[in-house]
Amino acid sequence: MNIDEDTSQWLGCPTPLEMYKHQCVMPQDEIANLHQQLRSARKNIQGLIQMKDHMATGKASTEVDSRRHSTISPGLTWKNPNRVGESAALNWSPISATTC
């Protein structure tokens, strides 16, 4: 038996060139995967920005409505359904941005 015989071909061992090519392909695949994840994240961020804009628009219109209806008289009373015959003063104030 000759130990010096090159057995890399018949054992299925890759050549150094094949190993280098494989090492180059692995980062390329990872970069392609990261690009796909980045595109997906950008779409998610765009959706969140649209949702935020929609909520800000709704908040602004609600604040306008709140200011429009803030002329309710302070002496307004309501009946307490839990206690018959009792009235309670209505304490009404618009919701501020700091309470949310």
Image (cartoon, helix red, strand yellow):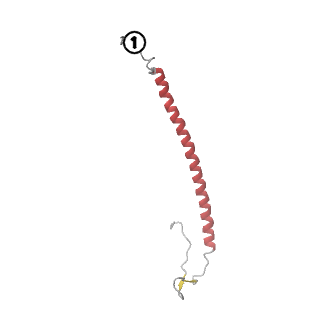
Picture layout, residue 18 above or below residue 54: above
Mark 1 falls on what kind of element? loop
In the displayed structure image, the side of residue 83 where residue 68 appears, left or right: right
For disc 1, the neighbor class at 10 Å (few under 14, some 14 to 19, many from 20) is: few
- Residue 9 versus residue 28: which sits nearer the camera? 9
x 59%, y 56%: residue? 51
Residue 81 x, y percent position in the rendering: 54, 82
In the displayed structure image, the side of residue 90 where residue 1 appears, left or right: left
- Residue 58 versus residue 7: which sits nearer the camera? 7
Residue 76 x, y percent position in the rendering: 58, 83
x 59%, y 47%: residue? 43
Query: Residue 5, located in which quarter of the rendered image?
Result: top left
Question: Disc 1 designates what residue?
Answer: 5
Q: Residue furthest top?
A: 2
Picture layout, residue 16 above or below residue 91: above
Picture layout, residue 44 above or below residue 34: below
Amino acid type, callout 1 = Glu
- Residue 65 versus residue 4: which sits nearer the camera? 4
Residue 78 x, y percent position in the rendering: 57, 83
Residue 18 x, y percent position in the rendering: 48, 22
Query: Residue 3, located in which quarter of the rendered image?
Result: top left
In the displayed structure image, the side of residue 12 where residue 60 appears, left or right: right
x 62%, y 75%: residue? 69
